[in-house]
Image (tube, rainbow, N blue to C red):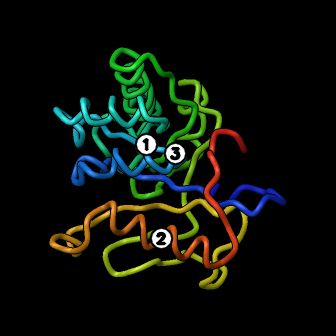
Amino acid sequence: MDHVATADRVVFLTYDDEAERDPQFVDMVRELRLPVSMFLTDSVVGPGYGHFARLLSVGADLQNHTLDHPALRGLPYAGQRAEICGQRDKLHARFGVRPRLLRPPYGAYDTTTLRAAADCGVSAVVLWRAALTGTGLRFTHGGAALRPGDILLVTSDDDDRGGPGLRERTTRLLRRIEGEGLTVGRLQDYL
C-alpha cells in the first residue's frame, strides 16, 4: 500500500533508518508533535537504537524494515520469516513494541512475503507514493501533486550526502504539505 483511502486531508510521513543522522530531528518531532513512522533495520540501526528510544518517547512509531535489509522478493519463506519475525522480536525486546507494519527493503515483495509477514503479526505492507531525497520529492505514479492519504518516504541515498539535514528536509516537506492544504496524520490511526 502506498496510499490510504481517506476523506481526511492528511498525508503520512515515514522514514527508513535515517533519523540518527540528524540529532535535531528528535527535537522537531517533540516540538511539533509530529506523527512519524520509523521503519527500522537492525543491521543499519545497530548502536543507534538509543536514538530511536528517544524518538519513541516523543511519539514516533517504530515499525519493521527487516533484520538485514535484503530484497525479500524471491527469498524462500524461511528466510523471509526470519528477517521479518527476527526484527519484530528485536523491536519487542528493546522497546516493548510489536510492529504491525512492514516496509520491505527496496519496496520489493511477493506473495511469500505477505504470508511470512502475516505469520509475524504484520497487518499491512507499507510502500510510498512519493519519496523525498536530497534532490526533491519523487512521485512513483499519479502526477506530482500530493493527495489525501499519500504515504511519503523521507530517506537519503548516496547522492544526498552533504545536503540539508533531516530536520531541514522535513521542514521543507511540511511547508509543501501545508501549501497543498494538507496536514500530517498518524499512519497507524488510519490502518
Identify the secondary structure beneath mark 3. Answer: loop
User: Which kind of residue does numbered mark 3 sit on?
Assistant: Arg
Q: What is the CA distance from the residue labelled 2 to the residue labelled 3?
A: 16 Å
The quadrant of the image that shows the N terminus is bottom right
The residue tagged 3 is 33
Front residue of 43 and 111: 43
**Res 14 label:** none
Q: What is the CA distance from the residue labelled 1 to the residue labelled 2?
A: 17 Å
The residue tagged 2 is 173
Q: What is the CA distance from the residue labelled 1 to the residue labelled 3?
A: 5 Å
Identify the secondary structure beneath mark 1. Answer: helix
Q: Position of residue 45 (x, y in %)?
A: 24, 39
Q: Position of residue 68 (x, y in %)?
A: 28, 39
Front residue of 141 and 168: 168
Marked residue nearer the N-terminal end (2 or 3) = 3
The residue tagged 1 is 30
Q: Position of residue 113 (x, y in %)?
A: 53, 40
Is 37 rendered above or below residue 146? above
- Alpha-carbon neighbours of circle 3 within 10 Å: few (<14), some, or many (≥20)? few
Q: Residue at x 31, y 49 (%)?
A: 19
User: Which kind of residue does numbered mark 1 sit on?
Assistant: Arg
- Alpha-carbon neighbours of circle 1 within 10 Å: few (<14), some, or many (≥20)? some
